[in-house]
Amino acid sequence: MKDGPPGLRGNLTNYGDSGFALFLRKAFIKGSGYTDDALDRTVVGIVDTGSGFNPCHGNMPQLIEAVKRGVMLAGGLPVEFPTISVHEAFSQPTSMFLRNLMSMDTEEMIRALPVDAVVLIGGCDKTVPAQLMGAASAGKPAIQLVTGSMLTGSHRGVRVGACTDCRAFWGRYRAEEVDDEEITEVNGRLVGSVGTCSVAGTASTMACVAEALGVSLPGSATPPAVTADRTRFAEMTGTRAVEMAHEGLTVDRILTRGAFENALRVLLALGGSTNGLVHLAAVAGRLGYSLDLDRFDAMSRETPVLVDLKPAGDHYMEDLHRAGGVPRLLQELRDLLNTDELTVTGRTLGEELDRAAAPFPQEVIRARTAPVYPAGGIAVLRGNLAPNGAIIKQAAADPGLMEHQGRAVVFEDSEDLARRIDDEDLDVTPEDVLVLRGIGPIGAPGMPEAGYIPIPRKLARRGVKDMVRVSDGRMSGTAAGTIVLHVSPESAAGGPLALVRDGDTIRLSVEERLIHLDVTEDELAARAQEAPRAEAAPRPGRGYRKLYVDNVNQAEYGCDFDFLRSETDRGAVPGAPTGPGAGGGGAHV
Ligand code: FES
């Protein structure tokens, strides 16, 4: 049980008279029709992130009802409460900008309310990270429930799903391979139901990563939003939350270094979203761990992509569920995992894998001997263009471009990109390297998913499908291409990306883990004197935007606010290698 009195007697409003505070609280809540018996029970808070602006959470009422049923079956009192809700397509300037606000809302409401345990219901990309960050800081027993993926749709006989196919169709529309009528028609086919994106985007990635962390029930990551499986998991989650409260199973006992290592493995084996790395760094930071990019890269070299999901593969989340979901993937990775880590069930990961269903023939989760991609989905790059690191989703890149040298074509920010990318007079060839700066955590602000720079229209019309692209921004997990992301430090923080000029030569070598600007140090120093970009950018003067820009840290720290990280330093994750399955050594960023 959490510190202090349990249930409704806990977390009293401070009037200077605790007896009166409890008397007043019970008087008010009895106005909602509760009896003293109900108010004496273990209280499970249910975080409601339903919103008319969040179709990814469109099944929230059904899930809350099922969680409540599960809580009451275990003798507890369920009480739901709202926090803000963040949907990718309804978040100006970006959902990432709002993630930290949602995490603060989540943390402070868990702290403020008299809940003995909490069920976090999230789904859309930034919501699960925000909830895990907040719950990690609040420190009470917490269990994650995801809303589940949407169903796929069908367009002219072809199966489609958000949002890899959204991007594919839009790319074909830009290349004038698809006309106005068809792009309007497919717009109504891409999202088959409520629920989260149906490919290995950030939502699916974080659902699987949460299960690997041990913070959600085994098997609960993959059932689609509108299935009976999803609702049953909601009921079981509610029941388990009551038991966790009685056991005092706080979230810090689950979110350990070993659990984060397991989650990073699954991120790699899934071919998951690059955003997953940023979010895991942020959640880990709330517990005092710092992401070691070089050890993560060493882990990547020995962890093949096993899940055949779009955008790196062919299938959708509902296929992954039918193939056995995350437990089946974890069985395949078992010798690379820390199986002694505790999960929300009260059992270790190893004990859960012993209880998992026996493998059966299927095509979505490959054996280690026949991977989708021989190494992990994400590689870490360094070089004079990214002294603190950058990443590339190598599993979704063009193999022919992974060793490439080309002439830089530079865009100052998203507005400059929008203005010029389709200009028929733009001096660009397929061999060039497209550079977009000013879209980092501070620069935009909110590190938009604009790193997926569109192929210039005049090249797209010629059939060019991919080019090397470099930015300090992010990319949706649903996108693919030879795209270098999260360049750190970002240009707005004075990173070398600010100093690149049109015509400079940039070299990418994924084999050497290198992103290099072929300009001398002296020349870069001279350019830095000429164009101090960081000071040139206007800073916001008030409100959340000021809080954000003044406090957000760089991608390798998760784009969290510095003041929200744990005050205790627990060291690096992955930890130092200790055995054949451990990651290699490397600098702690
Ligand atoms: Fe919500 Fe993709 S937009 S998960």
Image: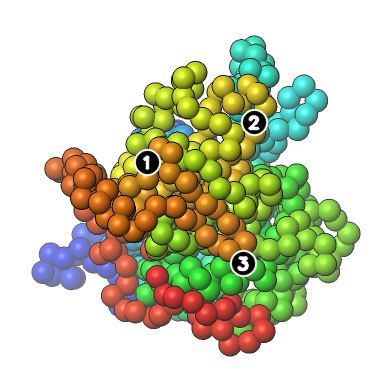
Q: Amino acid at mark 3?
A: Ser
Q: Is residue 550 left or right of residue 73?
A: left
Q: Residue at x 52, y 52 (%)?
A: 507
Instruction: Name the front one of labels 2 and 1.
Output: 1
In the rendered structure, find residue 501 and report the number of the disc placed on it: 1
Q: Residue at x 78, y 67 (%)?
A: 368
Instruction: Name the front one of labels 2 and 3.
Output: 2
In the image, 39 versus 491, the foreground residue is 491
For marks 2 and 3, the one nearer the N-term is: 3
Instruction: Please tell me whether residue 341 is drawn above or below residue 564 in the rendered image.
Output: below
In the image, 314 versus 224, the foreground residue is 314
Residue receiving disc 3: 300
In the rendered structure, find residue 464 and report the number of the disc placed on it: 2
SS at badge 1: loop
Q: Position of residue 457 (x, y in %)?
A: 55, 23
Instruction: Please tell me whether residue 255 is drawn above or below residue 408 in the rendered image.
Output: below
Q: Residue at x 49, y 56 (%)?
A: 515
Distance between mark 2 and mark 1 Cα atoms: 24 Å
Considering the image in quadrants, where does the N terminus appear?
Answer: bottom left
For marks 2 and 1, the one nearer the N-term is: 2
Instruction: Please tell me whether residue 501 is drawn above or below residue 572 in the rendered image.
Output: above
Q: Is residue 317 left or right of residue 11?
A: right
Considering the image in quadrants, where does the C terminus appear?
Answer: bottom left
Q: Amino acid at mark 1?
A: Arg
Q: Position of residue 456 (x, y in %)?
A: 53, 27
Distance between mark 2 and mark 3 Cα atoms: 29 Å
Q: Residue furthest left?
A: 16
